[in-house]
Image (cartoon, grey):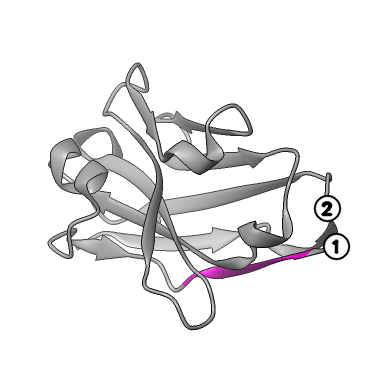
Amino acid sequence: QVQLVESGGGLVQAGGSLRLSCAASGRTFSNYAMGWFRQAPGKEREFVAAVGWSGGSTYYTDSVKGRFTISRENAKNTVSLQMNSLKPEDTAVYYCAADQSLRTVVSGSSGVNYWGKGTLVTVSS
């Protein structure tokens, strides 16, 4: 089992920044690809960003490219999402995810094995 706990959400004005963090425990963190997903009110959960086991490979959905940066620190069992130039449409609950398959995380598949409980990000206009 892998336990994931997100933190860092909150209320921010459009154009502002937030940094989300996810702390992992339970299994060897470096064996897992990590990702961030989000779910806005009334919408389906969508893929935001993913990072491979060593941190060398990163993937983003088009709407956040150039604004969000995903990173991981295997020594600290954490993955972060730096969000800049936030827009009201970024408002959502953000979930941390882990799976041994990077392809599964990037594809946004419901097959991702582990999920956090989420942290709310609200961007005001």
Left or right placement of residue 6 versus residue 96 in this view: right
Marks 1 and 2, the one that precedes in the sequence: 2
Q: Is residue 70 above or below residue 7?
A: above
The magenta-colored residue range is 118-123
Residue in view at x 49 percent, y 70 percent:
118
Residue type beneath disc 2: Ala
Q: Are the two marked residues, 1 and 2, in contact with CB atoms closer than 8 angstroms? A: yes
Q: Which residue matches tag 1?
A: 125
Q: Which residue matches tag 2?
A: 14
Name the element at disc 1. loop
Q: Is residue 68 above or below residue 117?
A: above
| Residue extending farthest top | 56
Q: Is residue 105 found inside the magenta-colored segment of the image?
A: no
Residue type beneath disc 1: Ser
Mark 2 burial class by Cα count in 10 Å: few <14, some 14-19, many 20+: some
Task: Give residue 58's position: percent from left, percent from top.
Answer: 37, 26
